[in-house]
Image (cartoon, helix red, strand yellow):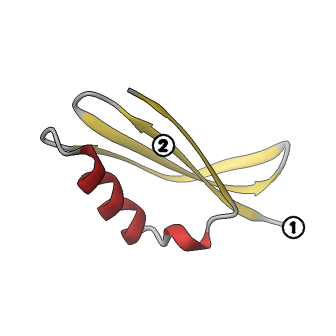
Amino acid sequence: MNRRYIGLDVGAEAVKVVELWGEPGRLAWTRRARVEHQKDPSAALLATLREWGWDGAAAACATGR
């Protein structure tokens, strides 16, 4: 069963987001984004997640500052 996963990296200057589809052990990225946040990472992250349909993801993982 294919599932959708989101990976997040919140850095000092940009938010990086990747979308993965597949099943454990066989994931492939389907899109990615790097969004400059102008010192407001939460606004940039929320806007990107809304655009990507965050609520449809099976799981997510985050890293960053």
Residue 16 placement (x, y as % from top left):
39, 41
Callout count: 2
Seen at 22% across and 31% down, the residue is 13
The mark lying in front, picked from 1 and 2, is: 2
> Element type at marker 2?
strand
Residue appearing at x 33%, y 41% in the figure: 15
Q: Earlier in the sequence, mark 1 or mark 2?
A: 1
In this rendering, would 13 be left or right of 16?
left
Which residue is depicted at the point 39% across and 70% down?
A: 50
Q: Which residue is mark 2?
A: 8
Residue 35 vertical position relative to residue 13 in the rendered view, above or below: below
Mark 2: which amino acid? Answer: Leu
The correct choice, above or below, for 3 with respect to 15 in the image is below
The residue type indicated by label 1 comes to Met
Identify the image quadrant of the N terminus: bottom right
Give how far across and how far down residue 54 sits, in percent: 51, 67
The residue beneath circle 1 is 1
